[in-house]
């Protein structure tokens, strides 16, 4: 079985397992053969409409089978896809359309007016609607039930496969341009250490615009598994029922999702034995969650992981090490190498602190149409033929080569002349079961340079006081790390991927 291109994931699975369910969505199901037929028909239509090798299609939808069909239709036509979160603000959507210059946008009728309002700012391409058509648009349902073959063309693994736009919380979104090689390499490495098998059934409630959610579909199609796709992380009890009814084996999460699961009463009494693994990324897994998750999902291996969109995934903690090194995000994943650059700019692979650098075929090609931004993060490596990714993340690497995330380098707090990791303080606060969300940030202070502020969200019904929280901090943190201010808040702002925003 040859797998060089991302589109091969669907082609091979449809060839080997045509009748197998690839995707559950609500009460509907899609076999590999059905998805492949629909994707080919879309590829044939856009190719006949002027779509060329290397062109782009934007999918502006919530999670749906049509999102998946749009992705693979773009690939089968020799182009690339970009899934845009359906909650994005208008000015960022306009920027993405201008930056990406798509040949088509796949969306629904509810978003047509909002898109057309952007015509004064950008060139709006033809719209393909998933729920019928309005004047001047195309109907996806008619297209996928047609019979147009995409033209034969030679695509190699260096060609563009996708552009994933980062959230852009501090400015315009950045388009992470990924080749087929980037994405195939990442998917192969992750499925290898997760030990995925054809019988795996993955529950995916994460947005497909977020690379973590997107790769659940891609990886499942690589090993011919099944995805239970949901529009979003909605009612927790509904998800528990889905896990039971669909016999879900893989549960990808972010910490905010886990916090909600851990608040639910009586989960230990539910039969969740089908879950064989839980994975976590998007933010570090609080160590205090691990024993509680073990009780709820008794058969599950727990993978704490670290990655960033620019290379998809970097490291994972083998489940066998989770009790020995619970606050680590592990070792470099297969076919990836990492090291840190210390304060003197020297490369260190053991027992050091510094900025994490990543090398491997999973590292992006560039930021799309942003050479200056690209040059800041892709820099010459130790060998003359390569560029490596400077992550901007501060890590400690121990004597065994295990990685410990300390925070974004621009998030590290300088207090009394010393560097303080907000993540270490947050992990201590998460040990309190009464707290479900935590954010630690600096506050300017004339004496200390920066004082430390902790904002915390209590679980419903909890009356834990600031004094009790501070007492716990005094018992578990050095004086330098003690929060000067603790504020109890109703909620904390989150990104579309569920990560608590620092800025």
Image: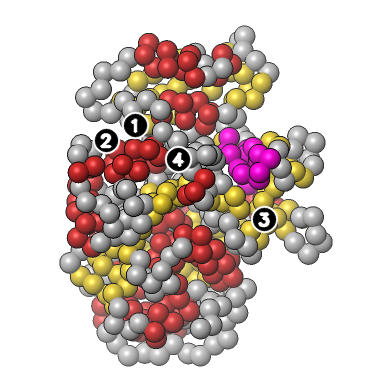
Q: Earlier in the sequence, mark 2 or mark 4?
A: 2
Tell me the CA gap for discs 2 and 3: 37 Å
Region rendered in magenta = 389-406
- 458 vs 371, left or right, is left
- 133 vs 101, left or right, is left
Residue tagged by mark 1?
436
Residue tagged by mark 2?
263
Q: Nearer the viewer, residue 384 or 197?
A: 197
Q: Earlier in the sequence, mark 2 or mark 3?
A: 2
Magenta region, main secondary structure = strand
Indicate whether 356 appears above or below 98: above
Residue tagged by mark 4?
285
Query: Residue 15 appears in which quarter of the rendering?
Result: bottom left
- Would you call the spot at circle 3 few (<14 residues within 10 Å), some (14-19), or many (20 or more)? some
Residue sticking out furthest to the top: 447
- Residue 390: x, y in percent? 67, 48
- Residue 367: x, y in percent? 60, 57
- Residue 218: x, y in percent? 43, 67
Q: Secondary structure at mark 1?
A: strand
Is there CB contact under 8 Å for labels 2 and 1?
yes
Is there CB contact under 8 Å for labels 4 and 1?
no
Tell me the CA gap for discs 2 and 1: 8 Å
Indicate whether 126 appears above or below 503: below
Q: Which numbered tag is attached to residue 337? A: 3
Residue sticking out furthest to the right: 384
Q: Give yes or no for residue 134 being in the magenta stretch.
A: no
Q: Earlier in the sequence, mark 2 or mark 1?
A: 2
């Amino acid at each position: 079985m040859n797998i060089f291109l991302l589109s091969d994931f669907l082609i091979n699975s449809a060839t080997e397992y045509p009748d197998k369910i690839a995707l559950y969505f609500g009460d509907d199901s899609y076999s590999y053969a059905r998805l492949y037929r629909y994707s080919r028909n879309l590829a044939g239509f856009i190719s006949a409409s002027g779509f060329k090798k290397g062109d782009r299609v934007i999918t502006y939808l919530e999670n749906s089978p049509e999102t998946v069909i749009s992705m693979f239709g773009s690939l089968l036509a020799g182009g690339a896809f970009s899934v845009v979160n359906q909650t994005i603000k208008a000015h960022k959507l306009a920027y993405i359309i201008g930056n990406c210059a798509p040949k088509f946008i796949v969306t629904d009728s509810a978003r047509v007016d909002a898109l057309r309002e952007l015509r004064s700012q950008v060139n709006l391409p033809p719209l393909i609607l998933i729920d019928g058509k309005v004047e001047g648009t195309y109907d996806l349902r008619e297209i996928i039930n047609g019979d147009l073959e995409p033209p034969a063309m030679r695509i190699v693994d260096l060609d563009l496969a996708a552009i994933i736009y980062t959230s852009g919380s501090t400015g315009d979104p950045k388009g992470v341009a990924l080749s087929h090689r980037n994405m195939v390499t990442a998917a192969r490495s992750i499925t290898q250490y997760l030990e995925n098998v054809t019988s795996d059934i993955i529950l995916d409630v994460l947005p497909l615009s977020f690379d973590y959610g997107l790769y659940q579909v891609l990886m499942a199609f690589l090993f011919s598994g099944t995805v239970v796709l949901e529009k979003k992380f909605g009612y927790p009890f509904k998800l528990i029922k889905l896990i039971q009814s669909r016999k879900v084996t893989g549960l990808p999460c972010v910490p905010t999702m886990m916090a909600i699961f851990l608040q639910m009463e009586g989960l230990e009494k539910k039969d969740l034995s089908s879950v064989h693994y839980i994975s976590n990324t998007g933010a570090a897994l609080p160590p205090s969650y691990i024993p509680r998750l073990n009780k709820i999902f008794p058969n599950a291996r727990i993978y704490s992981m670290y990655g960033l969109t620019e290379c998809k995934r970097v490291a994972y903690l083998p489940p066998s090490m989770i009790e020995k090194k619970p606050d680590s995000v592990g070792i470099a994943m297969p076919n990836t190498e990492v090291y840190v650059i210390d304060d003197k700019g020297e490369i260190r692979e053991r027992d050091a602190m510094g900025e994490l650098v990543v090398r491997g075929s999973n590292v992006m090609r560039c930021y799309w149409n942003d050479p200056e931004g690209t040059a800041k993060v892709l820099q010459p490596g130790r060998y003359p033929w390569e560029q490596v990714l400077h992550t901007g993340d501060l890590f400690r690497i121990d004597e065994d080569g295990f990685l410990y995330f300390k925070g974004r380098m621009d998030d590290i707090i300088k207090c009394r002349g010393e560097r303080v990791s907000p993540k270490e303080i947050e992990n201590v606060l998460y040990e309190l079961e009464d707290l479900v969300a935590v954010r630690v940030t600096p506050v300017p202070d004339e004496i200390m340079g920066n004082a430390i502020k902790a904002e915390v969200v209590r679980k419903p019904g909890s009356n834990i006081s600031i004094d009790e929280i501070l007492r716990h901090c005094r018992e578990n943190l050095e004086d330098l790390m003690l929060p000067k201010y603790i504020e109890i808040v109703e909620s904390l702002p989150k990104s579309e991927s569920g990560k608590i925003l620092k800025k």
